[in-house]
Image (spheres, rainbow, N blue to C red):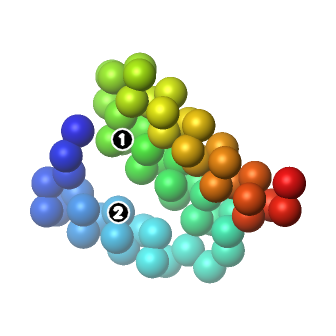
Amino acid sequence: MPLTPGQAAHWNRRIAATATNSDRAQALWDLARTMAGRDEAAWADLVRMLTAWTQARAGS
């Protein structure tokens, strides 16, 4: 689902306001759920991508 300009601005501000990878990860998970909407296949793809990102940042 594409974001409207207002939604994109909101998410850009929210992500820019994060100070730690933990904060950033929570914001990105929330954004992913918003973007996926009701599309479970898209949500599954985003979960795989963000899981890899989170593990890489955690040093796993």
Task: Depth check: give the residue in front, 9 or 44.
Answer: 44
Total residue callouts: 2
Picture quarter with the N terminus: top left
Q: Amino acid at mark 2?
A: Trp
In whole angstroms, how far apart are the C-alphas of marks 2 and 1?
10 Å
- At x 58%, y 65%, the residue is 24
Residue that protrudes farthest toward the right in the picture? 60
Mark 1 crowdedness (10 Å alpha carbons): few <14, some 14-19, many ≥20 = some
Mark 2 crowdedness (10 Å alpha carbons): few <14, some 14-19, many ≥20 = some
Q: Specify the label residue 34 is tagged with.
A: 1
Q: Label 2: which residue?
A: 11
- At x 43%, y 38%, the residue is 33
Are the residues tagged 2 and 1 within 8 Å (C-beta)? yes
- At x 23%, y 57%, the residue is 7
- At x 50%, y 27%, the residue is 44
Q: Amino acid at mark 1?
A: Thr
Give SS at disc 2: helix
Which label's residue is closer to the chain start, 2 or 1? Answer: 2
Q: Is residue 21 above or below residue 40?
A: below
Give SS at disc 1: helix
Q: Is residue 2 above or below residue 6?
A: above
